[in-house]
Image (cartoon, helix red, strand yellow):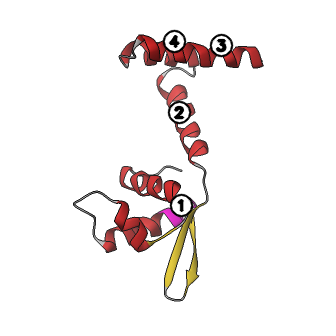
Amino acid sequence: MQLSKSEEELMNILWKQKKAFMKDLLEEYPKPKPATTTVATLLKRMTDKGFIDYKNFGRSREYFPLVKKKDYFSKHVNGLIKNFFNDSASQFASFFTQETNLSKTELEDLKKLIDSEIKKK
C-alpha cells in the first residue's frame, strides 16, 4: 500500500517527531498550514491503511508511526527498480549517476559506499 503525496508529507513529520498530537503536527507544516479537518482526514486514511496508530488521552489522540521510514522508502525504491528499470539495479544505478548531476565528490562518496558493501559480501 502507498501513501499519497500529502500523506507522505504528514508521515515525514510524524517520523521526525516519533509521536505527536494534532497540534504538534500542524505546527510543523509550513505556511499556509492545512486546515485541521484536512490533517484529521489524512490521519484517518493513514490509520486505515495501517501506517500509523494512536493512543487516546482524554479527548486527544497521540499519533505514532507503525512503519519505519527506511522500510517504506526501501519498498518504494525496489518497486521503482522493478517497474521502470526491468528489475535491474545496475540500470537504475546507471540512470541515477548520469541523470542526477552528482558532483565528483558525491560520486566518489557513492563509490566508497558501494566498495564497502562489496567487502561485506
Percent coordinates x, y for residue 101 in the rendering: 35, 16
* Residue matched to label 3: 115
Q: Is residue 94 magenta?
A: no
Neighbour class for label 1 at 10 Å: few (<14), some, many (≥20)?
Answer: few
* Residue matched to label 2: 77
Tag 4: residue type?
Glu
User: Which label is found at residue 49?
Assistant: 1
Of mark 1 and mark 2, the one earlier in the sequence is 1
Task: Name which residue lies at 57% across and 81% down.
Answer: 56
Tag 3: residue type?
Asp
Neighbour class for label 2 at 10 Å: few (<14), some, many (≥20)?
Answer: few
Say whether marks 1 and 3 touch (CB < 8 Å).
Answer: no
Q: Is residue 106 above or below residue 15?
A: above
Q: Is residue 23 left or right of residue 61?
A: left
Task: Name which residue lies at 60% across and 15% down.
Answer: 112
Tag 2: residue type?
Val
Alpha-carbon distance for marks 2 and 3?
A: 20 Å
The answer to which quarter of the image holds residue 97 is: top left
* Residue matched to label 4: 108
